[in-house]
Image (cartoon, rainbow, N blue to C red):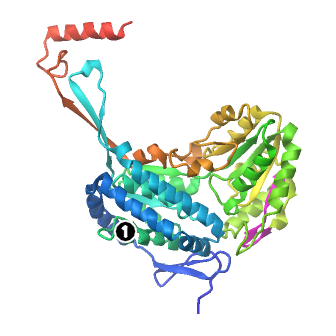
Amino acid sequence: MTAVHVPGIPVIEAGQLVSTSPASGVEAGRLPVATDVDVRQAVDRARVAGEWWAGLGFTGRRDRLLRWRALLAKRIEQLAEVVHAEGGKPVPDAIVEIVTAIEHIDWAARNAGRVLGPRRVRSRLILAEFSGHLEYQPHGVVGVIGPWNYPVFTPIGSAAYALAAGNAVVLKPSEYTPVVGQWLVDSFAEVVPEQQVFTAVHGLGDVGAALCRSGVDKLAFTGSTATARKVMAACAETLTPVLIEGGGKDAMIVDSDADLDAAAEACVWGGMTNAGQTCIGIERVYAVDSVFDTFVDKVVTRAGRLTVGPEGADIGPITMPKQIDVIRQHIDAAIASGGRAALGGPTAVQPPYVHPTVLVDVPEDSAAVQEETFGPTLTINRVRDADEAVTRANALPYGLGGSVFGRRRAVAIARRLRSGMASVNSTLTFAGMSTLPFGGVGDSGFGRIHGEDGLREFGRAKAITRRRARSLLPSMTFERTPTDMARLVKAIKVMYGR
């Protein structure tokens, strides 16, 4: 008989991490908890495997990664069910997540050689006797600490690009979704059985800390800003470079000439998909006064139609049970400070679910505006114009993504957002575009995954110069003469002194 546990709370029993559904408490799986020694041994094995993997070259790695992509595509329904069973995410949302991950594997595999491979770099006149060459070599072993809210898309956004660049990867999945992480590792091993190129270690936060100190050559982390600071501190002990995606409090701006139906539809999707548990999800909206009331009505109508429940619903349970208290506190504080619930409100919190909530006229100093809520809630505030909207959107230390709806000024407004990414007349779309880099600024982190920048993030630049002729202006030698130096000075004055 299947054991039933406290829904969604990971526990350790007899050296195993037990993962459960946040909706029912039904066990999703058990995986062995890694000790510090286990983590170091996993990294040591990965280092050996990584040498073999790097030796395959871009073509060999591409072929294997494309086989992995094909396997995920064939089993997309199976993986979606695992994501649903363990994290509570509705199956359609899980399918969308997996589709996006498959696209990133495909792009990284096909483009790694072009972006990272050896190429000639043009030299300048002052060193015309040398040719320049550049390539990006793999770091070796990359550690990836993944989140629970997108347990397929987010780890693959680092892992696939790291693998394409020639690194081995050790993944520490979130303790809330370890079964999904192990599924990814096991599926990769089916198409790459020769070496343990992509492996996983499981456990609570201490296992993530052990991975930071394990000797990995680079570490990619996705999670809260508070935990990101701890990860950086641990990695600093060994000068291990890090890539950080921290939290977000993304804003949408609705200008006076926006298509309000399209804006409302995208707003509800951007704020409430995956029960609002999205780092790049829309949490704050600033609508220009002339369209505010109409826009709010349209959002409330659409959000009010969403269904909530364990099976077949638009919105599933809150994956991490303790987050429900944060959501409740933010809703209560918003109303206590003068905000109004146009939809939902305090009664929307019905653990393990939170029903769609739209809060309006919430003071800017409220926690609902200032801090990550990570639930299916939106604050919509009235602004005088787009300039005021930009000022408010940029007032927080976060800077992950954002969205702008409008016609004449939308792109110009998007450029002014202090964020790593922005969507114009859509939401979240930059995450699925494999050709674009993904990442934030400020408290939302630094470094990039996806696109060409994402590939370069997992390779270290190696510059090589090669002499091809005698130096006409010898300077970097003790054999230089006063005449040589006089010619060099004269040449510099002619070239740059105008």
**227 relative to 348, above or below:** above
Q: Nearer the viewer, residue 209 or 163?
A: 163
Badge 1 is on which residue? 191
309 displayed left or right of 399: right
- The residue that appears at 64% across and 72% down in the rendered structure is 88
Q: Is residue 295 above or below residue 65?
A: above
The residue lying at 62 percent from left, 49 percent from top is 429
Q: Is residue 418 magenta?
A: no
Depicted 374 relative to depicted 262: above or below: below
SS for dot 1: helix
Task: Look at label 1 and name its amino acid.
Answer: Val
Position of residue 385 measured from the top left corner of the image (x, y, whole percent): 80, 33
Whether residue 304 can be seen here: yes
Name the main secondary structure of what is drawn in magenta.
strand
Q: Position of residue 393 (x, y in %)?
A: 70, 40
What residue lies at 27% left-to-right and 57% top-to-bottom? 56
Q: Quadrant of the N terminus?
A: bottom right
Q: Residue furthest bottom?
A: 1
Which residue extends farthest left? 479
The quadrant holding residue 496 is top left
Residue 359 within the magenta-colored segment of the rendering: yes
Q: Which x, y percent locates residue 152?
A: 53, 63
Residue 189 in which image quadrant: bottom left
Q: Quadrant of the C terminus?
A: top left
Residue 131 image position (x, y, % from top left)? 24, 29
Q: Residue at point 80% right, 41% down? A: 287
Span highlighted in magenta in the image: 349-360
